[in-house]
Image (tube, coloured by chain):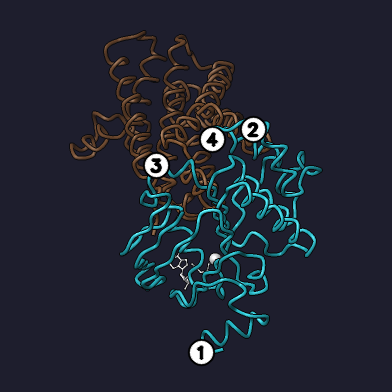
Chain colours: A cyan, B brown
């Protein structure tokens, strides 16, 4: 679904991504993990096509990232919730639904997916951070795009909600959606089918959670230090 | 485009302060002018102000609204979605255009109440075009601002020279050549010229038509520039 090849990105004169080569399988739930500042957001932005790249290539569904046709195929949740604070939850979703040219009846379904149905009539400015993040996630999912790019969607959520969201992600994957989900919490690796580990702008490893063993934190440290398991 | 226009209208509805600023402030400023000056001066300067206030107020409100869209990240989201940039700008233009019309209506009605002779309905058209021009420039300028404070700083840079050189504070005929040339290139000059002519009851003379065409052209240009400077990709 996504092919990244020798990707280099400079931001404000400093190298943020250095020679990243990776693939994301169609129908996978791929976790992009790394400490904060490692370049996760920058990599996701490059895939979505809103980040100017310095070298290499990023292709999505066979097209170069940023291609106009891809805008209808990718749902993108930015790290900071990007919804209108002075509109209600439902008004936000209805607006983005019409921009994405999809049926407004999707609004109810997608609000159920993120467990926000009861708050549909609430102004976003009156919501907590976690609730806003879920509205932002819902807008990314509204048009049922074949690729979902989610930047730290589960940060700050309670364990129950987090479990529910991961269930939703896997249900979507079973229906054919590809998901690329970033996180700086190693624990989340277990919920993914594939992993990309990022550190200081370089790809540390591409593997499955099983290959990392039981102690994910420890496995990550060993990878960083180059010590064999 | 319609969806965006309705969304912006909805946001404004939730923000009575801004709405009041848009509709009431020009009329309040006009009242100040009426009682600061003698009646004679008011009839002289007042008409020009019809071409100034809508511009300033629409410029400020549009620049700030668009800037919020940028800082909240919703602009990045929209640009990553299947939406044409022109549709976004036209959506804004539609809602703020309607507001500029209501605003001009209120302002002119109030000015007549204050004793200004406003014989021509064309005055409304000038004020509306002027408000829409302010809006288009505000959209354009918001591209260069990162904070609302910076928008505030741009106000004097974009608005004051236009105001000083527009002929409100001294006849253009008496300006030094260089200043008059600059004045010729600034759109507000034509708004001021048109409203003064219309208050003198010139009707739709050749000069007024020229003024209207220039205002319309400048608005289109600002919208096109605004669309061109909206970048889908950033560093
Ligand atoms: N807008 C920006 N301009 C310049 N540098 C940036 C910008 N955003 C992030 N960076 C830098 O890029 C690096 C990676 O950031 P980011 O991709 O946000 O990492 P992550 O999402 O993993 O926390 C950091 O060193 C950060 O300082
Ligand atoms: Mg990040």
Contact, mark 2 vs mark 4 (Cβ under 8 Å)? no
Tell me how many marks there are.
4
At horizontal 44% and vertical 31% (from top left) the residue drawn is B52
**Considering the numbered disc 2 on the image, is that residue within a helix, a strand or a loop?**
helix
The label shown at residue B10 is 2
At horizontal 39% and vertical 60% (from top left) the residue drawn is B235
Q: Which of marks 2 and 4 is in front?
A: 4
Q: Which of marks 3 and 1 is in front?
A: 1
State the CA–CA distance, disc 3 to disc 2: 29 Å
Labels 4 and 1 positioned on one and the same chain = yes
Residue identifier under label 1 = A225
Residue identifier under label 4 = A99
Identify the mark nearer the N-term, 3 or 1.
3
Q: Which of marks 2 and 1 is in front?
A: 1
Labels 3 and 2 positioned on one and the same chain = no
Report if the beta carbon of the residue with label 1 is closer than 8 angstroms to ligand 1: no
Q: Please tell me how crowded label 2 is: few (under 14), some (14-19), or many (20+) other residues with Cα within 10 Å.
A: some
Residue identifier under label 3 = A68
Identify the mark nearer the N-term, 4 or 1.
4
* In the displayed structure image, the side of residue A192 where residue A1 appears, left or right: left
Q: Is residue A222 above or below residue A79?
A: below
Q: Which of marks 4 and 1 is in front?
A: 1
State the CA–CA distance, disc 3 to disc 4: 14 Å
Quadrant position of residue A15: bottom left
Identify the mark nearer the N-term, 3 or 4.
3
Q: Can residue B88 be seen in this view?
A: yes
Labels 3 and 1 positioned on one and the same chain = yes
Question: Can you give x and y, in whole percent of width and height, for residue B220 in the image?
Answer: 35, 29
Report in which chain the residue with disc 3 lies: A
Q: Can residue B20 be seen in this view?
A: no
């Amino acid at each position: 679904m996504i092919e990244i090849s020798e990707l280099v990105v400079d931001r404000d004169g400093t190298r943020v991504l250095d020679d990243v080569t990776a693939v994301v399988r169609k129908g996978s739930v791929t976790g992009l993990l790394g400490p904060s500042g490692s370049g996760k957001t920058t990599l996701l932005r490059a895939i979505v096509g809103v980040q100017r790249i310095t070298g290499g290539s990023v292709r999505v569904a066979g097209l170069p990232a940023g291609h106009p046709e891809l805008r209808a195929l990718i749902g993108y949740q930015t790290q900071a919730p990007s919804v209108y604070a002075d509109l209600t939850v439902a008004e936000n979703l209805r607006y983005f639904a019409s921009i994405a040219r999809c049926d407004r009846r999707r609004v109810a379904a997608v609000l159920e997916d993120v467990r926000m149905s009861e708050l549909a009539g609430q102004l976003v400015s009156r919501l907590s951070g976690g609730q806003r993040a879920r509205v932002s996630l819902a807008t990314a999912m509204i048009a049922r795009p074949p690729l979902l790019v989610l930047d730290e969607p589960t940060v700050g959520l309670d364990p129950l909600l987090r479990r529910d969201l991961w269930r939703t992600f896997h249900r979507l994957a079973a229906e054919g959606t590809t998901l690329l989900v970033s996180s700086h919490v190693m624990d989340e690796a277990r919920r993914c089918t594939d992993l990309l580990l990022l550190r200081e702008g370089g790809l540390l490893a591409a593997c499955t959670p099983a290959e990392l063993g039981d102690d994910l934190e420890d496995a990550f440290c060993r990878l960083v230090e180059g010590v064999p398991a | 485009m319609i969806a965006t226009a309705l969304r912006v209208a909805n946001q404004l509805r939730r923000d009575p302060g801004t709405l009041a600023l848009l509709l009431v402030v020009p009329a309040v400023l006009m009242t100040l002018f009426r009682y600061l000056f003698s009646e004679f001066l008011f009839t002289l300067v007042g008409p020009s102000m019809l071409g100034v206030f809508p511009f300033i107020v629409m410029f400020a409100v549009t620049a700030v609204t668009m800037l919020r869209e940028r800082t909240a990240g919703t602009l990045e989201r929209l640009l990553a979605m299947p939406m044409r940039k022109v549709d976004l700008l036209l959506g804004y233009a539609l809602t703020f255009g309607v507001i500029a019309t209501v605003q001009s209506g209120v302002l002119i009605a109030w000015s007549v109440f204050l004793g200004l002779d406003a014989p021509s309905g064309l005055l409304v058209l000038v004020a509306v075009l002027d408000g829409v021009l302010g809006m288009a420039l505000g959209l354009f300028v918001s591209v260069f601002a990162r904070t609302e404070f910076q928008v505030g700083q741009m106000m004097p840079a974009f608005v004051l020279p236009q105001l000083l050189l527009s002929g409100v504070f001294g006849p253009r005929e008496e300006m030094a050549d260089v200043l008059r040339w600059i004045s010729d290139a600034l759109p507000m000059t034509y708004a001021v010229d048109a409203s003064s002519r219309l208050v003198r009851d010139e009707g739709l003379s050749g000069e007024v038509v020229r003024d209207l065409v220039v205002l319309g052209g400048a608005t289109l240009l600002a919208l096109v520039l605004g669309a061109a400077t909206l970048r889908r990709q950033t560093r």
